[in-house]
């Protein structure tokens, strides 16, 4: 129960709160807390007065530190102390391991010859106070490294288990390899040690590297050719591979990369099917292998084209790929406008296309030249080299020039043509010669797609210029494609052939007599297509609808009397019985009275047309009129062709 005095005070307070005449609270509060009425508690002990004062107790609780705050501060201090102690033990502790206390030292030459065996001493030192367990050494070699025990086997990584390395102990290993590469090429060897420590399954790794300079290549690869060339000119690239190794270089492969516009024509060593890869094989120490590539390049004036070649050991998985590259080399060519332009006309045909010729017909070839330089060119030499399956050296007739039959070329120089001693700026001229294409086929060696190739070249000395290559030349090529000889022949027979003929021989007026007409087509050097034979029968000759062989397409038009043999394609060299094309058809002839004592025509002139598949030329052949004179028949007797009464 509260004391009586306190109870009375509470009642008085209630009355004052609800009274309309109550004094201002603020005034009363001000008077209540005046300096004469308030006292300050100085005793904060656990006496009865402080316990009974709730205001002071509440202020004390607000300003005191909570239990959780104290716990947080203590935890933070503990963590800082733990981290500090751990760091101290990690870096200075006597029983913990640091990767910084493991060293990998590689000892070996810093400069080595390519292709020679070389050894590297590798030392792994454990400076920690604990043992390294299951230490595994891995050495990564750069591309172009092979096993010294087998130089054809590429060596990428060498691995060996060093085992346990005790505290303060050292493990040593010697590693050998053969390194290839271009001269002055820097290569890097990587080494790493993977290990564990006692009581842990985690693997740790320590790495280092070592650089080596290749001071010489095992093979010397050089490419030589013109520095400048004209568009369309044929030229040679000479690639030399010389061994610079003390050991045999095995399974050497040469691989090239051609620029745009280059056309591969031939090579001194046959390449693989891609025409850019050559299997050179083994090269003994000091030996040399040479590959000469012949080709032609097209391009615009002042363009530079680069040829790239590399040599190395053949890959074990791909025979067309270099597994270990030894060396590479480039050759740049600049396409220049020719200092003397050349052109070739054949029978006044100056088009850039191939000329279409015929066997046995003369061709007049004219080489025109023009000096493009602003200065004179002296000692000009023009050559015309002749080749091709239809070329016949016995049929060459040069004007002025000298025909060197041993080398199959015609030469014009200042000795044969004085005006070539000095050709002024803008000066032009011509030289000429005659040729005759010849079919040189034999029964055992037929010629297919015959041609004659003229390669004209010019060389000279430039004046008023310095540091200009003298081997710059101009060249132009013109080809004559020779059309095939396709021929049509015909005959009339009675006693032979696929049909039985009837009627009187010699033919008698107003009585029918039957005959067999035989057409034969032979072809020579090139296959032809769209071949067709046509002829008309006179009105007094009757078509009997008999054709042999029946596989041949022969038709007859009653209104016009036109006989058409649609042959189609004809193979080359059809002179053999199994390849030649032949057809037989039967006709009937009933002579009129006004044909007595005559040998009337049975078949009018026949014409063969075809297209040469090689030259594209339209081919023609004709067969003259066939009459009642069947003289090719073995049973024919003189006088049997004349009509009797």
Image (tube, helix red, strand yellow):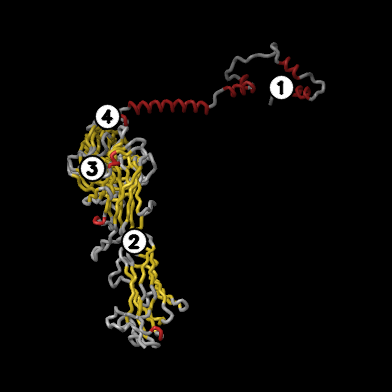
> Picture quarter containing residue 588?
bottom left
What element does badge 4 sit on?
A: loop
Residue 127: mark: 4
Q: In the rendered structure, which disc, 4 or 2, sits on the residue that comes first in sequence?
A: 4
Q: Residue furthest right?
A: 21
One can see residue 90 in this view = yes
Q: Earlier in the sequence, mark 4 or mark 3?
A: 4
Q: Nearer the viewer, mark 4 or mark 3?
A: 3
**Residue 95 versus residue 108: which sits nearer the camera?**
108
Residue 96 against residue 57 in the figure, above or below: below
Q: Which residue is mark 3?
A: 241
Circle 3 crowding by C-alpha within 10 Å: few under 14, some 14–19, many from 20: many
66 to 605, vertically: above or below: above
Comparing 114 with 175, the one in front is 114
Q: What residue is pinned by disc 2?
A: 483
Find residue 630 and report its horizontal and vertical position in percent. 32, 80
In the picture provided, is 379 more to the left or to the right than 539?
Answer: left
Q: Give residue 6's mark.
A: 1
| Structural distance between the alpha carbons of marks 4 and 1 | 86 Å
The percent position of residue 266, horizontal first and vertical second, equals: 28, 50
How far apart marks 3 and 2 lie (CA) works out to 44 Å
Are the residues flagged by discs 4 and 3 in contact, CB closer than 8 Å? no
Nearest to the eye among marks 4 and 1: give it: 4
**Other residues around mark 2 within 10 Å, as few (<14) / some (14–19) / many (≥20):** many
- Name the residue at 73% across, 15% down: 30
Say which element carries label 1.
Answer: helix
């Amino acid at each position: 129960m509260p004391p009586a005095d306190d109870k009375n005070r509470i009642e008085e307070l209630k009355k004052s709160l609800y009274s309309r005449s109550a004094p201002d609270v603020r005034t009363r509060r001000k008077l209540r807390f005046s300096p004469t009425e308030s006292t300050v508690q100085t005793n904060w002990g656990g006496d009865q007065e402080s316990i009974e004062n709730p205001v002071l107790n509440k202020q004390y609780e607000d300003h005191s530190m909570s239990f959780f705050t104290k716990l947080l501060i203590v935890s933070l201090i503990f963590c800082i102390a733990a981290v500090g102690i751990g760091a101290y033990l990690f870096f200075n502790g006597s029983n913990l391991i640091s990767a910084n206390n493991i060293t990998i030292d590689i000892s070996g030459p810093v400069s080595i010859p390519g292709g020679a065996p070389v050894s590297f001493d590798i030392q792994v030192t454990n400076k920690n106070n604990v043992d390294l367990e299951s230490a595994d050494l891995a050495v990564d070699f750069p591309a172009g490294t092979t096993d010294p025990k087998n130089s054809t086997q590429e060596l990428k990584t060498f691995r060996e288990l060093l085992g346990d390395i005790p505290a303060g102990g050292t493990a040593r290993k010697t590693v050998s390899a053969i390194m290839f590469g271009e001269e002055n090429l820097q290569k890097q060897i990587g080494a790493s040690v993977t290990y564990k420590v006692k009581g842990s399954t985690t693997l740790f790794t320590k790495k280092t590297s070592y650089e080596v300079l290749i001071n010489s290549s095992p093979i010397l690869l050089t490419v030589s050719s013109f520095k400048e060339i004209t568009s369309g000119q044929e030229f040679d690239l000479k690639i030399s591979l010389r061994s610079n190794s003390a050991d045999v270089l095995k399974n050497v492969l040469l691989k090239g990369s051609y620029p745009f516009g280059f056309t591969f024509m031939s090579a001194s060593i046959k390449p693989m099917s891609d025409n850019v890869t050559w299997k050179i094989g083994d090269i003994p120490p000091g030996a040399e292998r040479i590959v000469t590539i012949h080709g032609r390049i097209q391009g615009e004036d002042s363009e530079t084209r680069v040829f790239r070649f590399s040599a190395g050991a053949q890959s074990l998985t791909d025979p067309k790929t270099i597994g270990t590259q030894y060396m590479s080399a480039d050759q740049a060519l600049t396409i220049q406008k020719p200092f003397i332009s050349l052109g070739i006309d054949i029978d006044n045909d100056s088009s850039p296309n191939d000329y279409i010729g015929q066997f046995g017909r003369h061709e007049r070839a004219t080489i025109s030249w023009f000096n493009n330089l602003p200065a004179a060119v002296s000692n000009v030499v023009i050559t015309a080299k002749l080749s091709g399956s239809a070329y016949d050296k016995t049929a060459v007739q040069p004007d002025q020039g000298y025909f060197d039959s041993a080398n199959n070329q015609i030469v014009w120089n200042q000795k044969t043509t004085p005006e070539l001693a000095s050709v002024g700026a803008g000066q032009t001229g011509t030289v000429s010669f005659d040729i005759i294409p010849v079919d040189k086929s034999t029964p055992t060696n037929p010629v297919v797609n015959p041609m004659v190739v003229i390669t004209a070249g010019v060389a000279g000395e430039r004046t008023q210029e310095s540091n200009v290559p003298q081997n710059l030349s101009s060249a132009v090529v013109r080809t004559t494609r020779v059309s095939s000889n396709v021929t049509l022949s015909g005959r009339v027979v009675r006693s032979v052939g696929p049909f039985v003929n009837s009627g009187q021989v010699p033919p008698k007026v107003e009585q029918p007599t039957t005959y067999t007409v035989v057409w034969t087509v032979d072809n020579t050097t090139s296959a032809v297509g769209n071949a067709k034979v046509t002829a008309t029968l006179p009105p007094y000759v009757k078509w009997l609808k008999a054709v042999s062989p029946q596989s041949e397409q022969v038709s007859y038009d009653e209104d016009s009397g036109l006989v058409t043999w649609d042959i189609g394609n004809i193979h080359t060299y059809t002179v053999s019985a199994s390849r030649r094309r032949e057809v037989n058809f039967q006709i009937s002839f009933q002579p009129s009275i006004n044909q007595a004592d005559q040998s009337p025509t049975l078949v009018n002139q026949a014409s063969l047309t075809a297209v040469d598949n090689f030259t594209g030329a339209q081919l023609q052949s004709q067969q003259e009129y066939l009459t009642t004179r069947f003289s090719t028949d073995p049973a024919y007797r003189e006088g049997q062709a004349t009509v009797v009464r």
